Image (cartoon, rainbow, N blue to C red):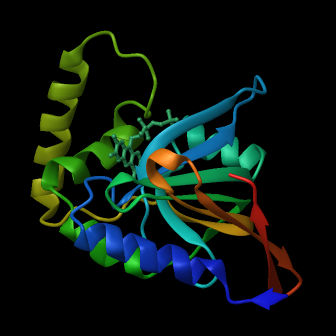
Amino acid sequence: MNVTNPLHELRQAREEARKAKDKLAEVVYITTISADGYPATRPVFSREITGDGVCLYLSELSPKFRELTANPKMTLTFHWPDIGRVFRVTGDASVIDNPAMESYWSSRHPTAQALAHFYEHVQQQSTAMASRDVLTNGIEKTKATLEKKGKAPLPKTWHCVLVKPHTVEAWTSGGDSRLHHRELYRRSGKDWKKSLLVP
Ligand SMILES: Cc1cc2nc3c(=O)[nH]c(=O)nc-3n(C[C@H](O)[C@H](O)[C@H](O)COP(=O)(O)O)c2cc1C
């Protein structure tokens, strides 16, 4: 049976999680495959969820970005405990142009903007620091440089990564009975097929 695009259900569930004031409403756990073959998972903020996929804003100067460039296969896990929903999305990542990044960038805290520039000009994300001073001093210097410019520009090393799913599992909690409801959507050409899974 052909069914509607599960990304609409995903977006709607995130909206419900927001309304329920779920603290994890904006968070998604993303898994890439690291060079040593082990899956690597970390939380990031999910940005736009469109009919095409899920957009993430990531620095190219990070292990996760290098990993998804070497191997675009990714899994994203959304967990919204306050509404009893989990979505597991598997798909392929690609970098896309996204004009919406600019307005999000302008809304970022000045220190968060400085951090993105710190990765470019002082030290890359997730590398080992000699001490915490490297960060605090480096951020102060970066902020001063950006203040002189008047406006912190969107770093060229920041990208919108679109994860285009080929499967989406939508899980709804059945509570203590553990009789959860699980629907697996699989892309089939332009359509989606749905099957029910044993919980
Ligand atoms: C709630 C939360 C949201 C986060 N959002 C982002 C994000 O949107 N982008 C990002 O690069 N890192 C984000 N991080 C930090 C990542 O979890 C991670 O520590 C960092 O990106 C380095 O990951 P990597 O070494 O695997 O590349 C977030 C962390 C938390 C706790």
With respect to residue 28, does 169 lie above or below?
below
Horizontal side of 68 relative to 7 (left or right) equals right
Ligand 1 image-quadrant field: top left
Q: Is residue 186 above or below residue 39?
A: below
Query: Which image quadrant: the N terminus?
Result: bottom right
Pick the residue in front: 158 or 146: 158
Q: Where is residue 159 in the image (x, y as percent from the top left)?
A: 51, 62
Q: Which residue lies furthest to the front in this view?
A: 177
Nearest the eye: 164 or 23: 23
Residue at left offset 62%, top offset 33%? 40
Residue 191 in picture, x, y percent from top left: 82, 87
User: Is 153 displayed left or right of 169 in the figure?
Assistant: left
Q: Where is residue 21 in the image (x, y as percent from the top left)?
A: 21, 63
Q: Can residue 138 be seen in this view?
A: yes
Residue sitting at 29 percent across and 65 percent down? 153
Residue situated in front as seen by the camera: 155 or 48: 48
Residue drawn at 82 percent across, 76 percent down? 187
Residue lying at the far right of the rendered structure: 189
Q: Quadrant of residue 147?
A: bottom left
